[in-house]
Image (tube, helix red, strand yellow):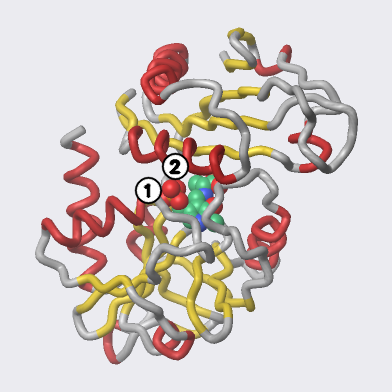
Amino acid sequence: MIYLNGQWMPIEEAKVPVLDRGFIFGDGVYEVIPVYRRKPFRAEGHMQRLARSLAAVEIPNPHPEARWLELLAEIVARQPFADQAVYFQVTRGVARRDHAFPKESTPTVFMMSNPLVTPSDQAYARGVACVTATDNRWLRCDIKSTSLLGNVLMRQYAADRDAIETIMFRDGLLTEASASNVLIVKGGVIASPQKDNLILPGITLDATIDLARESGLPLEMRPVTEAEVRDADEIWLSSSTKEVLPVTQLDGKPVGHGDGAGRPGPMMARMRAAYQAAKAAL
Ligand code: PDD
């Protein structure tokens, strides 16, 4: 069952008017929340980011956080499967087509939940391939907007090259990947770009930062150069549906140095263990 504007229904029955600004302009924001054994992972972080995205695009938040958390619990309970990827979307609503905000409109609220599909055991064991490109998206990548054409084209660029993700650089600095944040490891230190307008503030990235601290793994949030990424010992992707995933090929070349090149590194093993423990402790 899905949720649309206060009603529960099978997804086949859910319909949105063609003048919905989500359809016409991509004028909306969204969230993806991972759920393990019916327990949401970092739900508050996702709800706070949803509130921030809505405020950034001036869509009135239809619900206080407590109500969003209730709706989340309800959609989770309504599914026949336990591990879920819950999707929330809020658009500016239905109005005659004009770029400027309508004087009056009611936000469209849509929620669905699908089985959570994480990468295969083999992907975590062997690592995945990524390609790189110049980041050509807009300058408000901190908003989790449904206007995702830039990300869609980047993800397709990767898919066309049998890669999982496109890792992007802007002005010689790492930003993020098409649908994930990126971390690197060099000399036993994890580094990831500081949160600013050029990247999505990932909730999985927050979890990774906290777990690194708790596990005594050194981590720096700072500008990371393209050269550092290409010379890294390890490269990681983080996202709600990928968790923390090792990248072992970049533009067709093995990641890392010496015997371990092209294989997930020792820091990844520690982070993956910490991440699995955090899931088990939910
Ligand atoms: N994508 N950066 C981008 C551009 C993303 O689209 C995502 C997530 C992330 C990681 O954010 P989080 O850890 O909060 O999932 C970073 C989601 C999963 C998606 O669009 O399906």
Q: Is residue 133 above or below residue 5?
A: below
Quadrant for residue 210, please give it: bottom left
Residue named by callout 2:
49
Label 1 is placed on what type of residue? Ile
- Which residue appears farthest toward the right when viewing the image? 97
**Other residues around mark 2 within 10 Å, as few (<14) / some (14–19) / many (≥20):** many
Image spot of residue 136 (x, y percent): 68, 71
Q: Quick one: 146 or 64, which is closer to the camera?
A: 64
Q: Residue at 31% of width from left, 82% of height from top?
A: 233
Sequence-earlier tag: 1 or 2: 2
Q: Residue at 54% of width from left, 40% of height from top?
A: 55
Q: Ligand 1: does it lie within 8 Å of the C-beta at label 2? A: yes
**Other residues around mark 1 within 10 Å, as few (<14) / some (14–19) / many (≥20):** many
Instruction: Indicate left or right for 264 with 179 as reference.
Output: left
Q: Is residue 99 above or below residue 92?
A: below
Q: Are marks 1 and 2 in contact (CB under 8 Å)?
A: yes
Looking at the rendered structure, the secondary structure element under dot 1 is helix
Instruction: Indicate left or right for 269 with 214 as reference.
Output: right
Label 2 is placed on what type of residue? Arg
Q: Quick one: 156 or 229, which is closer to the camera?
A: 229
Q: Is residue 216 above or below residue 226?
A: above
Residue named by callout 1:
203
Looking at the rendered structure, the secondary structure element under dot 2 is helix
Q: Quick one: 143 or 32, which is closer to the camera?
A: 143
Separation of marks 1 and 2 at Cα, in angstroms? 9 Å
Q: Ligand 1: does it lie within 8 Å of the C-beta at label 1? A: yes
